[in-house]
Amino acid sequence: MRWARWGVLLVCVAVILMVMLAPAASAKPAPPTPVLAPASGVWTWTYVDYGIGWSAMLGDWSYNFNDAERGIWKGTFNGRSVEPWCFYVDPEGNAWAMISIGFRGKVAGHHGTADIALTVEIAGDVPKGTPMTGHWSVVRGTGGLKGLFGMGTWTEDLVAESQLTDTGVANYAGAWWLPPCRSR
């Protein structure tokens, strides 16, 4: 009889342990924590006149839409882009531009498209000949770039630009991350 009690007790303990451990054994592992990789390279752009630019004054503010640019990206981002943009200037001469970049190309061997928002910030008291600067951020990606995340800064390269005609040149830097298991 004594052995029977111990047997029942062992079976009960085994059942309790199985019930307690079963959810832990079947739980999916947590997704990996994203590790951002450095992004850097050169972005060049050429102004394209599609004949749809316009300007307007609203109070003391000037608003301008100036057609688009075509871009070439080398470095972490390798590809081409179309870049419609607009800018506005406040009464003190400070200017901001917003460029909506439609990128098509590769990042780390993954091919797809990405929408990149880029800003230009120019203070009114900056002397002429000072490089433009700003920030960029990946808004979304498709294809092999689905889930692409990235952001950083850019600075115009006036030395490289001076050797070209109707073309702007900038160096970009920042960080990016692409979820694992992407098709190439």
Image (cartoon, rainbow, N blue to C red):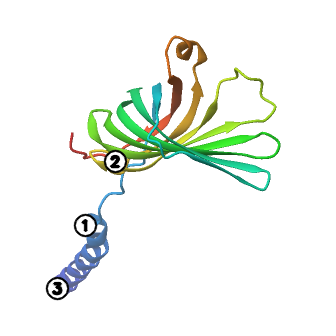
Farthest residue toward the bottom? 1
Characterize the local packing of mark 1: few (<14), some (14-19) or many (20 or more) Cα atoms within 10 angstroms: few
Q: Please report whichever mark, 3 or 1, sits nearer to the chain's N-terminal start.
A: 3
| Residue 36 in sight from this viewpoint | no
Which residue is disc 3 drawn over? 4
Residue 16's place in the image compared with 180, above or below, is: below
Q: Give the secondary structure at mark 1.
A: helix
Image point (52%, 30%), residue name: 173
**Label 1 to label 2, Cα distance in Å?**
24 Å
Q: Could you tell me how far apart the alpha carbons at marks 2 and 3 are, in whole angstroms?
A: 56 Å
Quadrant holding the N terminus: bottom left
Q: Which residue is mark 1?
A: 26
Residue 18, above or below 116: below
Marks 3 & 1, CB-CB < 8 Å contact = no
Can residue 67 be seen?
A: yes
Closer to the observer: label 2 or label 3? 2
Q: Disc 2 residue type?
A: Pro
Residue 73: x, y in percent?
40, 29
Image coords of residue 86 (percent x, y): 57, 46
In the rendered structure, which amino acid carries the disc numbered 1?
A: Ser
Q: Does residue 128 appear to the left or right of 45 in the view shown?
A: right
- The three-letter amino acid code for the residue at tag 3 is Ala
Query: Which residue has dot 2 on it?
Result: 179
- Is 114 left or right of 90, judged from the image as shown? left
Displayed quadrant of residue 21: bottom left
Position of the C terminus, as image quadrant, is top left
Mark 2, Cα crowd under 10 Å, few <14 / some 14-19 / many 20+, is: some
